[in-house]
Image (cartoon, rainbow, N blue to C red):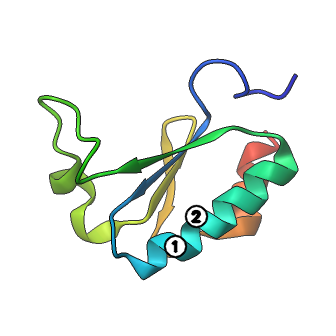
Amino acid sequence: MPQGSVGEPRVLLYTRQGCHLCDEARAVVTDVCGAAGEAWREIDIDVDDAPGGDLVGRYGDYVPVVEVDGVQQGFWRVDGARLARRLAR
């Protein structure tokens, strides 16, 4: 069973509505995670901010942001090859 298929996904993609880079990042994450058999989750920083959290303050101008296993892998442009290497670990 692929890691990340049970419980919380290994890959988190932080986005905002109306963000063209977020659309591009979503396509890369969908392709790479699909090929790797990994689950992923998208978090809209304007909508899904947890009580007491400050996702807008943390990520605001940097979206899209990709995290794997809680470690930020990049922002603005998602490198599909780098993401695939990280998921292979």
The local secondary structure at tag 1 comes to helix
The residue indicated by pointer 1 is: 23
Give residue 75's quadrant in the image: bottom left
Return the x and y of residue 12 as percentages of the image width and height. 51, 44
Which quadrant, please, contains the N terminus?
Answer: top right
Give residue 78's quadrant in the image: bottom right
Give the residue displayed 23% in from the left and 63% down from the top. 60
Which quadrant, please, contains the C terminus?
Answer: top right
* Image vertical order of residue 32 relative to residue 22, above or below: above
Side of 21 relative to 26 (left or right): left
Q: Depth check: 36 or 43 in front?
A: 43
Say which mark, if any, is on residue 53: none
As shown in the figure, which amino acid type bears the numbered disc 1?
Asp
The span from disc 1 to disc 2 (Cα, nearest Å) is 5 Å
As shown in the figure, which amino acid type bears the numbered disc 2?
Arg
Return the x and y of residue 31 as percentages of the image width and height. 76, 61
Mark 1–mark 2 contact, CB under 8 Å? yes
The residue indicated by pointer 2 is: 26
The local secondary structure at tag 2 comes to helix
Give the residue displayed 29% in from the left and 42% down from the top. 48
Side of 26 relative to 76 (left or right): right
Give the residue displayed 46% in from the left and 78% down from the top. 21
CA neighbours of label 2 inside 10 A, class few (<14), some (14 to 19), many (20+): some
